[in-house]
């Protein structure tokens, strides 16, 4: 999973924190009863994965309390290389609670989905999204949400829209990064008065 993440998200901040940080992050998801982890395999080789917590705010709060020091240790080399940038981002990470949409208490967060370049175009990523949504619904979620960059990111935005995600809102982060927050209503879960989302 770490190797796939590094290939798929080479220029992202999380990747810059190093394989040790990523390994601990994904192990925390795999080992948590409050998270979903699915992998795509082809001929016994992992082609991709999808992960995310069922109850994001509580999950990230507990993760910080239980493993915060270990994550800080893993991020130390990156912090020493770029103390200003990495330090400010880590402070924001401490406060991160999943950017949960307001008024939807049972929304699972799709934190990350990635496939190898060899699996791109095979339908593996779409299958992972559908597997995640099915598992979230089976475990009591009414919605799945995610965030992705609004700007210079047309392929990802089209991909999520094809998989029945609608733009719920636009989130501007403290560093100025503008994100589309997508929301998908899970089958049979819609109730009167809940946000419907909007198409792009």
Image (tube, grey):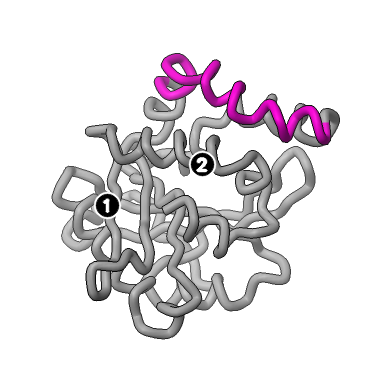
Q: Position of residue 90 (x, y in %)?
A: 68, 29
Q: Pick the residue in front: 118 or 138.
A: 118
Q: Position of residue 71 (x, y in %)?
A: 55, 26
What is the quadrant of residue 80 in the picture? top right
- The image's mark for residue 192 is 1
Q: Position of residue 106 (x, y in %)?
A: 30, 40
Q: Is residue 153 above or below residue 23?
A: below
Q: Of label 1 and label 2, which has the lower sequence position?
A: 2
The reply, left or right, for residue 127 in relation to residue 72 is left
Residue 194 is a magenta residue? no
What is the quadrant of residue 81 in the picture? top right
The reply, left or right, for residue 113 in relation to residue 128 is right
Q: Residue at x 45, y 34 (%)?
A: 24
Q: Is residue 68 above or below residue 53?
A: above
Spatial separation of the CA atoms under disc 1 and disc 2: 39 Å
Mark 2: which secondary structure?
helix
Q: Residue at x 34, y 75 (%)?
A: 124
Residue 77 is a magenta residue? yes
Q: Which residues are magenta?
A: 62-82
Q: Residue at x 41, y 41 (%)?
A: 26
């Amino acid at each position: 999973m770490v190797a796939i993440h590094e290939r798929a998200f080479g220029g992202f901040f999380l990747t810059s924190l190093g394989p040790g940080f990523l390994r601990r992050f994904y192990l925390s998801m795999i080992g948590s009863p409050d998270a979903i982890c699915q992998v795509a395999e082809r001929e016994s080789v992992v082609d991709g994965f999808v992960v995310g917590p069922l109850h994001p705010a509580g999950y990230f709060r507990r993760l910080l309390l239980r493993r915060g020091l270990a994550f800080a240790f893993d991020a130390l080399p990156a912090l020493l290389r770029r103390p200003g940038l990495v330090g400010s981002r880590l402070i924001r990470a401490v406060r991160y609670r999943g950017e949960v949409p307001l008024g939807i208490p049972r929304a699972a967060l799709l934190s990350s989905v990635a496939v190898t370049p060899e699996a791109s175009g095979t339908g593996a990523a779409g299958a992972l999204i559908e597997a995640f949504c099915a598992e979230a619904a089976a475990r009591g979620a009414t919605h799945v949400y995610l965030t992705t960059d609004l700007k210079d990111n047309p392929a990802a935005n089209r991909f999520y829209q094809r998989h029945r995600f609608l733009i719920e809102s636009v989130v501007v982060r403290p560093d100025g990064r503008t994100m589309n927050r997508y929301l998908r209503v899970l089958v049979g879960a819609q109730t009167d008065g809940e946000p419907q989302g909007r198409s792009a």
